[in-house]
């Protein structure tokens, strides 16, 4: 039986698709207005579905949209021009709406009624950008201005200007940071390893300076210490199961822009192993092996 299409048909797909689309435009425009609106709506939804369900194009488009940081800043602009506050507000709403629709289609799961899994948006998040050298120097001087005298500030400003001059040390270091960020693009942040090593090299007391802890809810009083411990353990086990099955949804700013959920992988079955100069973090990757917990009572 003859196949529905040949290899040459696939290679020529952009050509015949564009020809077909151009040929359909007069037909769509000739339809009555209510029908035309419905047809365009269906075409828009179908386009979003096709683009987002093709893993690479949809997720790359989402990552490209998430690179824009303009929605973080307060609206401002010159009155009477295109960049007025109302225009910026409209642009922000259009951006957030597009981002919400595309992320919903990319992570759609029929079994969860469209709710995204905990780590379903991780590969769409852009890595931390390298700040501009000039901007870094300006922020450094702005942070030092309240702390230094006029004479000290002028001396520091001269040193910073020499550091950031053309062909100076600052440019060489900036170029090295940009190359490092490009090399690690799509895998991790350029500062992630350095940040974690600095944290693991701290030699001061962890119970005071480094560790975090959790408490049970104050509005659910318990008669004994054993009951309080049981409630806390029960809640922790339920939360661990939600992370394991990814029943939790990724956190989103303004309900749309996703945040990185990678640290949730270390919330359980993780320990910090001490070292002479730097500690290491060990995380069990096989959840089936994590069936124990530690209880400390009366220093035991």
Image: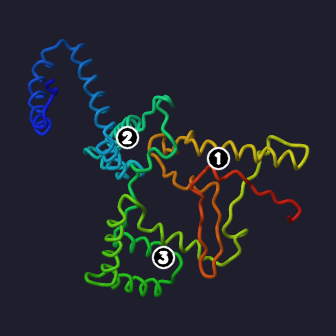
Of mark 1 and mark 2, the one earlier in the sequence is 2
| Tag of residue 145 | 3
Q: CA distance from mark 2 to mark 3?
A: 39 Å
Indicate which disc, 2 or 3, sits on the residue closer to the N terminus: 2
Secondary structure beneath label 1 = helix
For marks 1 and 2, give the one nearer the viewer: 1
Q: Quadrant of the N terminus?
A: top left
> Element at badge 3?
loop
In the depicted structure, whether residue 218 falls above or below residue 41: below
Image coordinates of residue 26 in percent, x first then y, are: 9, 21
**Residue 39 against residue 166 in the figure, above or below:** above
* Rendered residue at 35%/41% (across/down): 95
Q: Looking at this view, is 186 or 9 the one in front?
A: 9
Q: Report which residue position mark 1 lands on.
A: 240
Q: Quadrant of residue 281?
A: bottom right
Q: Give me the disc on residue 99.
A: 2
> Is 93 placed left or right of 21 in the picture?
right
* Coordinates of residue 64 in the picture (x, y in percent): 32, 49
* Total numbered badges shown on the rendered structure: 3
Contact? badges 3 and 1 (CB < 8 Å): no
Write the residue at 34% across / 80% down.
Answer: 170
Residue 174 image-quadrant placement: bottom left
| Residue 171 point in image, percent of width and height | 30, 78
Q: Nearer the viewer, residue 12 or 221?
A: 12
Label 2: state its secondary structure.
helix
> What's the distance in space between the residues labelled 1 and 2, CA to CA?
29 Å
The answer to whether residue 273 is left or right of residue 149 is right
From the top left corner, tell me how far across and down residue 223 is, in percent. Answer: 91, 43
């Amino acid at each position: 039986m003859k196949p529905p299409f040949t290899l040459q048909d696939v290679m020529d797909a952009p050509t015949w698709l564009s020809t077909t689309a151009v040929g359909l435009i007069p037909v769509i425009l000739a339809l009555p207005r209510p029908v035309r609106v419905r047809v365009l709506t269906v075409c828009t939804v179908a386009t979003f579905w096709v683009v987002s369900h093709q893993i690479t194009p949809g997720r790359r488009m989402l990552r490209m949209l998430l690179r824009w940081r303009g929605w973080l800043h307060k609206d401002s602009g010159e009155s009477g021009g295109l960049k007025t506050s109302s225009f910026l507000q409209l642009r922000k709403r259009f951006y957030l709406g597009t981002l919400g629709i595309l992320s919903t289609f990319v992570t759609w799961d029929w079994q969860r009624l469209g709710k995204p899994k905990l780590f379903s948006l991780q590969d769409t998040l852009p890595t931390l950008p390298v700040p501009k050298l000039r901007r870094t120097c300006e922020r450094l001087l702005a942070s030092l201005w309240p702390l230094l005298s006029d004479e000290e500030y002028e001396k520091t400003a001269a040193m910073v200007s020499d550091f950031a001059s053309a062909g100076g040390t600052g440019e060489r270091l900036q170029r090295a940071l940009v190359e490092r960020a490009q090399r690690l693009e799509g895998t991790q942040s350029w500062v992630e390893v350095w940040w974690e090593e600095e944290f693991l090299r701290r030699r001061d007391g962890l119970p005071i300076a480094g560790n975090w802890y959790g408490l049970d809810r104050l509005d659910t009083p318990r008669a004994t210490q054993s009951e309080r411990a049981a409630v806390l353990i029960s809640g922790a086990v339920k939360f661990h199961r939600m992370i394991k099955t990814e029943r939790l949804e990724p956190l989103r700013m303004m309900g749309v822009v996703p945040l990185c959920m990678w640290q949730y992988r270390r919330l359980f079955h993780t320990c910090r192993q001490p070292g002479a100069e730097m500690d290491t973090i060990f995380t069990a990757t096989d959840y089936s092996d994590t069936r124990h917990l530690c209880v400390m009572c009366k220093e035991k």
